[in-house]
């Protein structure tokens, strides 16, 4: 699968998972359309996978949107002051679902993978733009909140199986 098809699939899955799981409705956007990230405190959630292929998925999402996400997943009122750990858990769960769906759609239902526990960190603005310059992110917005995702696959290295002497 070429890179543009993989990015399109990731974008479609990202939107579908947010709609069906959290009742949030992302719209696909081009980051270069003048979106400012200065006003957002961003989280980066990374999940590594290994098995038939190795790689990593990443979800980058504003903390404020995580609060709404957590409230929707838990059936709570977003004004109840959802604590930060619930926000992190909600974002981790979304990345788990997104990763499972993209791996299944990319490699089929018979492919086997081990998923790591998603790791969450606050993201410095400079670190985000270093990653974006690689051109591997897809971007959507929910109510003017940006959401970014990426999937990086490691190159498959084939080992020569010698017969020995």
Image: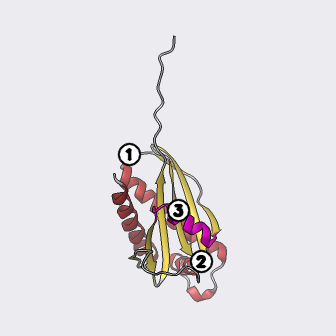
Residue 110, numbered label: 1
Mark 2 or 1: the one toward you: 2
Earlier in the chain: of badge 2 and badge 3, it is 3
Residue 151, numbered label: none
Q: For the point 47% across and 16% down, which residue is it?
A: 163
Say whether residue 121 is magenta. Answer: no
Within-10-Å neighbours for mark 2: few <14, some 14–19, many 20+:
many
User: CB of mark 2 within 8 Å of CB of mark 1?
Assistant: no
User: What range is drawn magenta here?
Assistant: 123-137
Instruction: Name the residue tied to disc 3.
Output: 58
Q: For the point 60% across and 66% down, which residue is it?
A: 127
Q: Name above or below for residue 122 compared with residue 7.
A: below
Q: Name above or below for residue 69 compared with residue 162.
A: below
Query: How far is mark 1 from mark 3, CA to CA?
Result: 23 Å
Instruction: Name the residue tied to disc 2.
Output: 63
Q: For the point 47% across and 84% down, which residue is it?
A: 144
Secondary structure under the numbered disc 1 in the rendered image: loop
Within-10-Å neighbours for mark 1: few <14, some 14–19, many 20+:
few
Q: Name above or below for residue 6 compared with residue 91.
A: above
Query: How far is mark 2 from mark 3, CA to CA?
Result: 15 Å
Percent position (x, y) of residue 43?
60, 71
User: CB of mark 2 within 8 Å of CB of mark 3?
Assistant: no
Earlier in the chain: of badge 1 and badge 3, it is 3
């Amino acid at each position: 699968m070429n890179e543009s098809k993989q990015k399109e699939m990731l974008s479609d899955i990202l939107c579908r998972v947010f709609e069906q799981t959290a009742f949030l409705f992302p719209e696909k956007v081009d980051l270069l359309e003048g979106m400012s990230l200065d006003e957002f405190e961003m989280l980066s959630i990374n999940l590594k996978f290994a098995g038939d292929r190795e790689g990593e998925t990443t979800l980058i999402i504003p903390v404020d949107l995580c609060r709404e996400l957590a409230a929707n997943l838990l059936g709570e009122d977003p004004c109840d002051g959802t604590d930060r750990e619930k926000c992190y858990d909600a974002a981790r769960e979304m990345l788990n679902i997104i990763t499972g769906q993209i791996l299944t759609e990319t490699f089929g239902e018979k492919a086997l993978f081990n998923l790591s526990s998603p790791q969450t960190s606050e993201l410095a603005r400079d670190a985000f733009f270093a990653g974006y310059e690689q051109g591997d992110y897809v971007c959507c917005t929910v109510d003017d909140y940006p959401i970014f995702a990426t999937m990086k696959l490691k190159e498959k290295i084939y080992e020569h199986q010698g017969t020995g002497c």
